[in-house]
Image: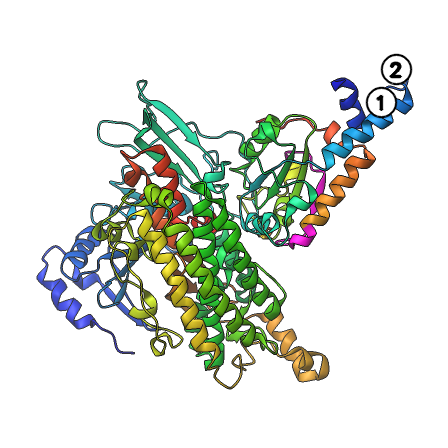
Amino acid sequence: MSMSLDSAMTGTQNHDDLTRSFAFTTQLDAVMTWGQRNSLWPLAYGTACCGIELMSVMGPKYDLARFGAEVVRFSPRQSDLLLVAGTITEKMAPVLVRIYRQMLEPKYVLSMGVCASSGGFYRAYHVLQGIDKVIPVDVFIPGCPPTPEAVLDGIMLLQKMIKDQNPRPWKQNWKAPEL
Amino acid sequence: MKHLISFDELKSDFVKNQSLQVEKYIFIDAFGDQAIEVPKDDIVVLMQFLFEVKQFDFLIDICGVDYPDRALRFDVVYHLLNSITGQRLRIKSQVAENEGVESVIQVWKGADWFEREAFDMFGIKFHGHPNLRKILTHHEFVGHPLRKDYEASRQQSCATSLPIHFDNEPGSPGDVLNPKLLPLNIGPSHPAMHGTLRVMAELDGETIVRANCEIGYLHRCFEKMAETHPYQQVIPYTDRLNYCSAPMNNIGYCKAVERLLEVEIPPKAQAIRIILAELSRIADHIVAVGTGGVDLGALSAFFHLFVFREKIYDIFEKLCGARLTVSLTRIGGIGNEPPEGWYQLILDFCDSMDKEIDEISRLMLDNKIFVKRTMGVTPIKPQEAVAWGYTGPLLRATGMAHDIRKLKPYYGYDQLDFKIPVGTSGDIYDRYLVRIEEMRESVKIVRQICKNIPEGDYTIRDKSIVLPEKKDVYGNIEGLMNHFMLIIKGIKPPQGEVYDATEAANGELGYYLVSDGSAAPYRLKVRPPCFAIYQSFPSIVKGSMIADAIAAVASMNIIAGELDR
Ligand code: SF4
């Protein structure tokens, strides 16, 4: 079961597998992805200003709970969405990678703000120029900081990706950096 | 400008002290700041003297400045403050590349992290400092980034994290752990550490035997970025220092540059700046109190308070279109005229905020669990706090009514009716008490100003400082030329240096700005309030329970953006 789920997530079904009826797996997948996308448990990796704006997303007005993603877990073992909100410095990079590796599959990464996505306007000696240098990212949200609406949009995009079972080559081809 | 203390008086006092080489001193009085250049061998004796005899009780900041063409390459700069009179003094000393200077940690223990930072950034050695190691950059980083010959964009990757370590103390080296005790690492990715702080401790049961904190996980090279950007473009970077109250950082920075340019902003701009500053103070305290509650397990205060923070963001958004990182001020005034109905919006907010403060104070301060978790926990005495360099709500919680808005009023704070709330014991409970009362006072200030907005322009109209309005840029050739020239050439303040401080939400936010006459700052050092406060953490939590340490971190309201810069 876990095998088929895993391969379904990565979009590499083994179509020769005669033990699985096509109709059956799509339906099961549909149920699984429905469950997954509506109960994303984020690990809020808020390091800077974007983390403050992320609080607004969680807070009463924008209310991430409407998207089933309000159960913030600070343990990587319990969460499936790594929400990186804020600048990641060179000093922080090994910590981020370790957290990512500790998360269980299936897992997704959302990069909130230009700092996390590309280093932003910190073209500077101590700032990692984008977290995609060290971990695979599914959705980038632009903005400095992105408005809460933009973050919600990013989450909806991720939900859609899960629903459509988009292939994720960036994740498949990811190799843990030598840390 | 008249000073509280004259150089003649200082000189005559100095000569009485045989060990000072007064004849070599250079006394500088420029841009309203007093500075003395002294030989480096005199530093400790001089500091001791200023501390004991002249009552300079605060060591506000220590920093380096690099002049690569000089034989004695570095300036070590000390900023002192006499908290009773408000007198400030800057002491500078030159050191060569491979020399060092005596540490002043014996005079003020708050010199600890400041000296480590100067060492990290410039490689200046401080003899006698027990823990002179890197502080902001990672441990694999080679070189000293704020030296002029270090390229701003040269990154060095880091593959590992340091193991648990402590400060060296007599008889107990920092990197040797005690096998009988339990080592514990919290953070940097931990909810109570706000994502970027790392605390290490050795525990006996639940009691902390020794603790240490590692910072620098959010070192975004603000000061280097400032050196490589023109004056106007530094403003957005300042937003991201203390991002919980971004406008205050804009204001502090612009105020420093304006002093260097020797311009005075119009009354209306001053009034708007006060409104922005006080609203940000409220927003900052909302975050401090709200997340402080969360760290103790009280979620409801957070949800309650954040509704009001959203209202403040709405007010900012109405003015400039951004919520959090607003960059509202310009050198010379404010970016634009507030929209119609803006002041009324603020007045409405004030009314609802008053009620909310009552509610929140009932919800938190009268809550039995909250009281038990905070009252009498990690208290600190005023003298102790001053020695560490505490300012802001944490210092006032100890009972010292120190506030720059009263001590050296700017922008007409002296015309306003407000009080400085103080605590009595300096414990965690008092810190929240002071913050909640300060919100009340800020509401009072904002209300007074909104009812009484001065007429006139919102910015000065000096063509070499302020960009023309958009309608002129698009409408006539002079405006277009003016815009073009100012963008290409930038603002060029005269050569010189200033230190300017404002009362930010966490305490004294200072900007030390050195100009070489070019369009970008030669050096911009920020004196972040929580840097001085947080360095005391290992010593104040010693002997308390681990859960109390969490409450203590939360009450300090450490904002990594300004801590690590
Ligand atoms: S993207 Fe902007 S708001 Fe977000 S962490 Fe970076 S500087 Fe701060």
Q: Chain of mark 2?
A: A
Residue located at (46% from left, 66% from top): B277
Query: Is residue B408 shown left or right of residue B331?
Result: left
Residue A176 horizontal side relative to residue B98, left or right: right
Q: Is residue A14 visible?
A: yes
| Chain of the residue displaying label 1 | A
Q: Is residue A80 above or below residue B122?
A: above
Main SS category, magenta section: loop
Q: Residues within 10 Å of mark 1 (few under 14, many from 20)?
A: some
Q: Which residue is mark 2?
A: A17
x and y, in percent, of residue B281 in the image:
44, 62
Residue B376 horizontal/vertical position (percent): 27, 44
Between B79 and B179, the residue placed more toward the observer is B179
Q: Label 2 amino acid? A: Asp
Q: Is mark 2 within 8 Å of ligand 1?
A: no
Q: Residue under label 1, please give it.
A: A13
Determine the image quadrant of residue B337. Answer: bottom right
Q: Residue at x 35, y 44 (%)?
A: B368
What's the magenta region?
A134-150
- Circles 2 and 1: CB atoms closer than 8 Å: yes
Q: Are marks 2 and 1 on the same chain?
A: yes
- Classify residue B8 as left or right of residue B73: left
Question: Within the magenta stretch, is there residue B360?
Answer: no
